[in-house]
Image (spheres, rainbow, N blue to C red):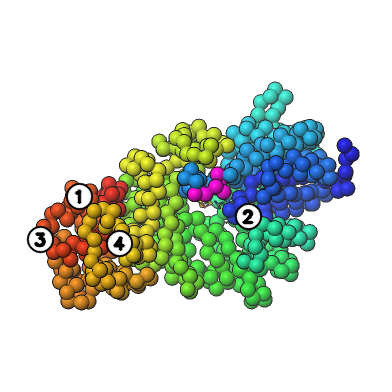
């Protein structure tokens, strides 16, 4: 076969790890390309997102013939979706996208294909997904080289590496030595580039990528620009300090500004300013960044930006960020349990988290649904975490600040948790052959999405579906006001029928339906929805409230939130595990009171609370 080498390059970089659920033009293409240009080396990058595996041999053959690279690199940005809930959904067959996303296996297959076609071409793997667990991945993928961490030393020593010279002198390099032993050189972390990285050619490639994989009419591409590297903390679930270093180094803002101005001149309007966190504690650099973005905004109205932020930020600083068209993006607050935050080694306190959540709700753009995500299913929770979190949320009326709360559970593990002192937990699960299987957390297979779930929850519930329902319950009924939308009047009759409870009469249904609190989006969360203004209703309220031992307000309203309702019921009926047990103890209830009790139980999730009582009882 004739070799068609119209555009030979030194280094060809391929990506088989783009997550189809959220396609992005890999910033590594930009950064690595820029490093190679600095060293006068020719570079080409190709993303295989959306290419069917059956076409890979032909596409790879074409690329290798066309670019005749001296070395082929593989960018492993992430090893999977890293979210347990995706794999539970995939196991239920409700989502196939993440089940079909196998970047590690795909990269392995691509390395083998490259080797088959051009056996003498060297291969190397790198990327943050690789850098979290480099040795197991190196052993599995078997490239010629691996690079754990920044690319700098690879680009700087490219010729030496390809000719096998002084390999042990190249920071971050992993290779197999003459005796067949895998050697990982000491790690070094490099500051971000002191030169601009984007060129018109790169922007054309970026545009072509988004034109093909996204709908640019829906939203303009969000373009990554690095502002800093490294994180001084060590949250148990995060590998960034290992991959990017524990020392924070900020890239010169003059360079960043030049980069942004160039991108704006090319029509880019949305930016992701890349760093581990925008505001590592004690460092007010982010205000400089915001000032720069504010100045750019005044010159170029309409631009906007995002960057990850930690919850310790002053309200006025957050307001300032928002004034520069900052779009909030944060890694979820874990919980509002001091013990949990400490055990998980996150750098913020409950006070920070609480204040941040309040600010986030207050400053969220007008007219948008207020949503929050909490990581209260982290594996460092104790039996008391959910209750403590719910207690704070109730105390500060945070539940009323959010229309929706999604609770993340399970931690992606990488097999080195024991070694790093992070502990393992008993409940490991790996996704294999379309299903979740029990897995040992300390010997995680680097190729399989592997997670551990919190012992306190899994021990109590055992069934994964129930774990999922439990966290949905927390999000809907304890941490937000989503319950108001979750259980509307229309589902009430069916709910009663499923439980063999007396059906509401049409007159009772009509009353429930016309009650103002039943309306979606009702604002008064203090009063439980069962309260009402009509004398007859108040009479019913009083009757069952007295029966249940609930304190009523002057106007007949029940002036507290779901948590307080549950606690009151738990205390009064310590043995009750379902609603019938409570009703049995209320023989004096009128039929109407029974229906209202059922409505209250349905609407406010009392049936669920009783089911999950053991998980909410610890102080
Ligand atoms: C910003 C960000 C996002 C933004 C991206 C916005 C944008 N327009 O680019 C958003 C929010 C969209 C996002 C989405 C996702 N992200 Co993200 N993201 C990040 C973050 C903070 C920065 C990413 C980045 O651009 N870094 C800069 C690049 C250039 O760094 P790099 O890839 O490491 O590359 C350097 C070196 O590794 C090396 N290198 C890279 N490749 C290669 C190859 C070779 C051969 C060599 C020699 C060297 C080399 O050179 C580069 C320069 O030094 C990182 C954490 C971090 N600090 O990096 C998480 C991170 C990468 N994301 C992560 C995840 C899980 C995701 C999602 C899968 C989440 C999800 N379920 O949707 C998606 C995937 C999106 C996709 N299609 O790929 C995880 C990956 C964890 C893992 N072990 O796999 C990380 C590490 C966060 C974390 N702490 O867990 N993300
Ligand atoms: S502060 Fe952020 S980047 Fe740093 S270790 Fe924790 S989660 Fe990771």
User: Disc 4 on helix, strand or loop?
Assistant: helix
> Which residue is denoted by mark 1 in the rendering?
576
Report the span colored magenta: 94-99
Query: Is residue 545 one of those drawn in magenta?
Result: no
Specify which label sits upstream in the sequence, 3 or 1: 1
Residues at badges 2 and 4 in contact (C-beta under 8 Å)? Answer: no
Q: Alpha carbon of mark 3 to alpha carbon of mark 4: how far?
A: 23 Å
Q: Residue furthest left?
A: 588
Q: Quadrant of the N terminus?
A: top right
For the residue pair 245 and 466, the one nearer the viewer reads as 466
Specify which label sits upstream in the sequence, 1 or 2: 2
Q: Position of residue 506 (x, y in %)?
A: 25, 68
Q: Is mark 3 within 8 Å of ligand 1?
A: no
Residues at badges 3 and 1 in contact (C-beta under 8 Å)? Answer: no
Q: Residues within 10 Å of mark 1 (few under 14, many from 20)?
A: some
- Closer to the eye: label 2 or 4: 4
Specify which label sits upstream in the sequence, 3 or 4: 4
The answer to whether residue 579 is above or below residue 117 is below
> Which residue is denoted by mark 2 in the rendering?
23
Q: Position of residue 19 (x, y in %)?
A: 61, 50
Quadrant in which residue 208 is drawn: bottom right
Q: What number is the disc on residue 492? A: 4
Q: Is residue 322 left or right of residue 12?
A: left
Q: Alpha carbon of mark 2 to alpha carbon of mark 3: how far?
A: 61 Å
Q: Residue furthest front?
A: 506
Q: Alpha carbon of mark 2 to alpha carbon of mark 4: how far?
A: 41 Å
Q: Position of residue 94 (x, y in %)?
A: 49, 49
Q: Is residue 588 left or right of residue 482?
A: left
Q: Residue at x 11, y 57 (%)?
A: 587
> Which residue is denoted by mark 3 in the rendering?
588
Query: Is residue 97 one of those drawn in magenta?
Result: yes
Q: Residue at x 74, y 49 (%)?
A: 46
């Amino acid at each position: 076969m004739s070799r068609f080498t119209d555009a030979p390059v030194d280094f060809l970089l391929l990506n088989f790890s783009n997550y189809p659920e959220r396609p992005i033009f890999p910033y590594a293409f930009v950064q690595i390309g820029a490093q190679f240009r600095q060293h006068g080396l020719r570079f080409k990058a190709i993303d295989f997102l959306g290419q069917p595996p059956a076409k890979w041999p032909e596409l790879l053959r074409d690329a290798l013939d066309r670019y005749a690279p001296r070395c082929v690199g593989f960018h492993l940005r992430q090893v999977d979706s890293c979210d347990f809930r995706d794999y539970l959904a995939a196991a239920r067959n409700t989502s196939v996208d993440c089940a079909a996303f196998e970047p590690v296996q795909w990269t392995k297959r691509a390395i083998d294909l490259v080797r088959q076609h051009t056996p003498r071409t060297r291969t190397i793997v790198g990327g943050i997904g690789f850098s979290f667990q480099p040795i197991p991945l190196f052993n599995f993928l078997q490239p010629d080289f691996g690079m754990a961490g920044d690319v700098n030393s690879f680009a700087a020593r490219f010729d030496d590496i390809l000719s096998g010279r002084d390999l042990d002198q190249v920071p971050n390099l992993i290779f197999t030595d003459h005796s067949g032993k895998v050697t990982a050189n000491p790690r070094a972390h490099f500051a971000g580039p002191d030169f601009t990285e984007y060129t018109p050619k790169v922007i054309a490639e970026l545009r072509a990528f988004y034109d093909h994989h996204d709908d640019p009419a829906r939203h303009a591409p969000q373009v990554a620009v690095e502002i800093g590297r490294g994180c001084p903390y060590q949250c148990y679930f995060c590998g960034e300090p290992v991959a990017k270093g524990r020392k924070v180094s900020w890239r010169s803002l003059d360079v960043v500004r030049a980069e942004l101005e160039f991108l704006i001149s090319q029509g880019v309007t949305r930016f992701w300013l890349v760093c581990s966190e925008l505001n590592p504690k004690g460092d007010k650099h982010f205000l400089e960044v915001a000032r720069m973005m504010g100045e750019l905004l005044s010159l170029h109205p309409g631009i906007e930006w995002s960057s990850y932020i930690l919850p310790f930020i002053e309200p006025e600083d957050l307001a300032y960020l928002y004034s520069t068209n900052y779009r909030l993006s944060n890694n979820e607050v874990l919980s509002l349990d001091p013990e949990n935050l400490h055990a998980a080694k996150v750098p913020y306190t409950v006070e920070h988290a609480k204040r941040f959540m309040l600010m986030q709700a207050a400053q969220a753009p007008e007219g948008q649904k207020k949503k929050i995500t909490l990581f209260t299913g982290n594996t460092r929770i104790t039996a008391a975490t959910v209750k403590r979190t719910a207690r704070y949320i109730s105390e500060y009326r945070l539940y009323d600040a959010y229309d929706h709360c999604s609770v993340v559970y399970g931690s992606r593990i990488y097999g080195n948790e024991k070694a790093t002192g992070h502990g393992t937990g008993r409940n490991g699960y790996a996704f294999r052959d379309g299903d979740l299987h029990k897995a040992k957390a300390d010997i995680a297979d680097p190729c399989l999405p592997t997670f551990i779930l919190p012992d306190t929850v899994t021990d109590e519930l055992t069934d994964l579906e129930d774990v999922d329902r439990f966290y949905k319950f927390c999000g809907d009924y304890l941490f937000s006001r989503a319950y108001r939308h979750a259980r509307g009047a229309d589902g009430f009759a069916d709910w009663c029928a499923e439980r063999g409870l007396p059906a509401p009469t049409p007159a009772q249904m009509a009353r429930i339906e016309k009650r103002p609190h039943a309306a979606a989006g009702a604002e008064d969360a203090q009063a439980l929805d069962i309260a009402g203004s009509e004398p007859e209703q108040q009479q019913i309220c009083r009757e069952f409230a007295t029966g249940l031992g609930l304190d009523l307000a002057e106007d007949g309203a029940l002036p507290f939130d779901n948590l307080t309702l549950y606690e009151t019921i738990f205390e009064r009926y310590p043995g009750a595990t379902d609603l019938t047990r409570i009703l049995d103890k209320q023989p004096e209830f009128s039929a109407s009171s029974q229906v209202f009790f059922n409505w209250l139980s349905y609407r406010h999730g009392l049936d669920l609370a009783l089911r999950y009582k053991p998980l909410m009882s610890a102080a």
